Amino acid sequence: MKWVKRVFKLLAAVLLLLVILLASLITTQDDTPLVDTSFYKQWKEIAADPAIRPVITADSLKAGWADVNITPGKPGPMAGYGKRRGKPFVGVHDSVFVRTLVLESSMTRAAIVSADLLIIPPTVTARLRQLLTPSDIPYEHIYLGATHTHNSVGGWGTGISGLFFSGSYDPEVEEYLAQAIVRSLRKAQRHVESATLTYREAYDTANINNRLIGDEGTVDPEIRAFELQAKSGRKLTLVTFGAHSTVLNSGTMLLSRDWPGILLDSLHNGKQESGMYLAGAVGSMAPRSQGDTDLEAMADQGNGVYQALKGVVADTAVTRPGLAALTLPLPLGDPNPRLTTRWALRSWAFNRLFGEYPNEIKALRLGNILMIGLPCDFSGELMAPLDSYAKARGLNLIVTSFNGGYIGYVTADRWYDLDQYETVTMNWFGPYKGAYFQEAIKDLIDLFK
């Protein structure tokens, strides 16, 4: 019977090792109340620092814009849906670009960059910072965003998340994209001229729905946009909206801008009129389109948003627009990514698998418009009270996602316990982040009012 005892001892040893391994990898959710967390206190200190208060002067405005084609010359990994595992695209439906708007006042230079990418990858952001020279617009004044197409260039992600969502990491892709952003910045700067500014708002309930909770939830139906009319006659319309760029399904292996490309093509009119698009508060928000194929549905969605944009409900000309921009660190504490509604992966394991990058929040005030860029899929359900808060202080608020970092989804706290993709799989930093991000945005509204 000695062999039986040996087997039991071996099984006991294996079981003990498994318990130790699980204990080292898995923990419970950290439910510390928001106001008691160290990251909340750190943010409040940052926001209260008088040294960061922007100087906003109302004077003349200059603007210039340009684009750079980033369509690869040969097939490579396509970023977007995890089920693709980064497989290469097989063709190009429509080209993808980096688009840049440069803004100048007598005291400030700033830029808004939008790329036809899933996100602005943190790896690319880090390389961009290295490439900028003293004569370029400083990184802290560069506002980054993406169209969030799920059918664009991959190969930029590190760790396991990169393998699933963007394919195997390729440093040449990182360099290629960062260099394209720099080229677009410098190209746009060569076209700077006097310009006038008009803020526009429209509503579109027909082309957006709540994919997280359906009719029990809310949507963010506002199309937020502004138009720049240059002295030479050139015109640029910058548009943001909350519907995800996910009309093309995971089986369509064609490079494409998805429905925002249709919208921008509609805005384009020869050399004089062009468009620029940034994904807004897309968390929990899905497109609502119709068509016998996903390509037909893509056209339906893009044309639908374009038609809705033409039905402007607010049109405000800004006679002497001020300009200010800043980038601030955004404390979040350690990642606490959920495995279930109760259990979470330990921070060290998450960082090892997904990589560690700094988290930032970006803000840019242009006249009576305040743009705030976040490192996440920010939920459209969180927008209504923020809109009201900003308008009560004389500002038109535009919130965009994918500002060069990425921390997963930020959803309304009331849905935190839902066992859903956005609230579990893509919730990487624990509870109360909806309230935290809303408060951080309000602090910036107060700072820039």
Image (cartoon, rainbow, N blue to C red):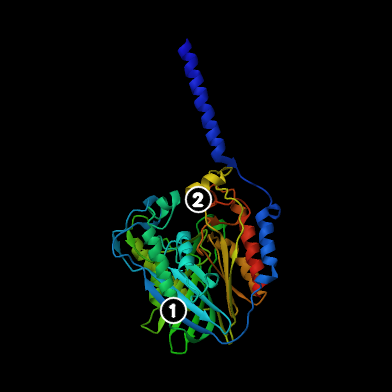
* Front position in the image: 333 or 251: 333
Q: Residue at x 67, y 66 (%)?
A: 47
Residue underneath mark 1: 188
x and y percent of residue 53 in the render? 66, 73
x and y percent of residue 309 in the render? 48, 75
Residue underneath mark 2: 421
Element type where label 2 sits in the image: helix
Q: What type is the residue that disc 2 sits on?
A: Tyr
Q: Which marked residue is nearer to the observer: mark 2 or mark 1?
A: 1
Q: Which mark is residue 122?
A: none
The answer, for residue 383, to whether it is visible in the render is: yes
Q: Residue at x 39, y 54 (%)?
A: 169
Residue 108 quadrant? bottom right
Q: Are marks 2 and 1 in contact (CB under 8 Å)?
A: no
| Image vertical order of residue 47 relative to residue 415, above or below | below
x and y percent of residue 443 in the render? 66, 67
Is 430 left or right of 426, judged from the image as shown? right
Is 87 left or right of 322, judged from the image as shown? left
N-term-proximal mark, 2 vs 1: 1
x and y percent of residue 5 in the render? 50, 15
Element type where label 1 sits in the image: helix
Q: Residue at x 46, y 59 (%)?
A: 123
* Front position in the image: 317 or 161: 161
Task: Identify the image quadrant of the C terminus.
Answer: bottom right
Q: What type is the residue that disc 1 sits on?
A: Ala
The answer, for residue 116, to whether it is visible in the render is: no
Is 172 left or right of 284, judged from the image as shown? left
Q: Could you tell me how far apart the alpha carbons at marks 2 and 1 are, in whole angstroms? A: 39 Å
